[in-house]
Image (cartoon, grey):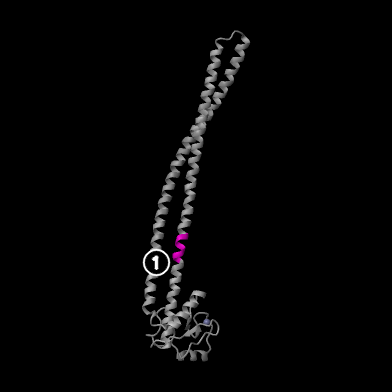
Amino acid sequence: MPNLKFQEQLKLLHEFQQIDAEILRLDNRLKSVPLKIKKADEQFQIHQQKLEEKQAQLADTEKLQRTKTAELEMEGEQRNKYQSQLREVKTNKEYEALDKEISFIQEKEAEIEDAILTAMERIDQLNEELAQQQKNFEAEQEKLEAQKTEYAREAKDLKAEIVKWQGKQQSFSDQIDSGLINQYQAQFKRHRRGLVSLVVENACGNCHLTIPPQTLQEARKYEKPIHCGSCRLILYIPSPSPDDAPAEESTPGSD
Ligand SMILES: [Zn+2]
């Protein structure tokens, strides 16, 4: 054990483990940042999909318009053919048959023209919707970029804070007995819990069990580690002097 007395050792170790708990909390927040980025990306994908769906609808309708226009052209050619044949027929019966064919084609042509008109109207509407969706998409994209910048800043700040706490920890870790530190670190690694419990109002700060007066008396002697009867952590009771009280928790004075 270094020249510091056991009470001081426990005080420093308690501070050391409080900092570890803080670092763990910060590290958990740091680990959640990539998950938040992933979630934001996934939400953005929905906007991208909507845009692509609209683009596909427009492409389909434009294709329909082209197909119908080609059909109209074909029907027109057939009609022209019949119309020139009409001038060369010899009998009334032939004339009537051809005339019937031509009327039939004309009906089809009217139907196709209607379909082309409907497709053109739909194309106009889709173009309008697409322009709006494109705008939304760009706004969402900007939002995503801003959010990612914010997340990157958050991660940077968290890392800096962790480094700051680690530095603080290192500044006094050499004052703590290495055996005690090793014991604590093994415990923290395995169970994510400390080795020392701060006694607050005669109760264990970790599990809140009220410590029997005799145990408190023993613990105050600081001759050997005295453990909480329930959670088995080493009891640390700060001295009544305000100079010795840890800054992070106020503890009432005791005799
Ligand atoms: Zn306890």
Position in image of residue 110 (x %, y %): 54, 24
* Residue topped by disc 1: 159
Instruction: Answer with left or right where residue 156 lies relative to residue 75.
Output: left
Magenta residues (range):
29-35
Position in image of residue 31 (x %, y %): 46, 64
CA neighbours of label 1 inside 10 A, class few (<14), some (14 to 19), many (20+): some
Position in image of residue 128 (x %, y %): 45, 39
Answer with the quarter of the image where residue 33 lies.
bottom left
| Above-or-below relation of 3 to 89 | below
Residue 57 shows in the view: yes
Residue at figure coordinates x 52%, y 30% from the top left: 67
Instruction: Tell me which amino acid carries mark 1.
Output: Lys
User: Within 8 Å of ligand 1, the CB of disc 1?
Assistant: no
Give the dominant element type of the magenta stretch: helix, strand or loop: helix
Q: Report the number of numbered marks.
A: 1
| Above-or-below relation of 99 to 217 | above
Position in image of residue 88 (x %, y %): 56, 9
Answer with the quarter of the image where residue 249 lies.
bottom left
Residue at figure coordinates x 51%, y 84% from the top left: 203
Residue 250 shows in the view: no
Residue at figure coordinates x 38%, y 76% from the top left: 170
Q: Secondary structure at mark 1?
A: helix
**Magenta stretch: includes residue 245:** no
Depth check: 62 or 166 in front?
166
| Above-or-below relation of 70 to 171 | above
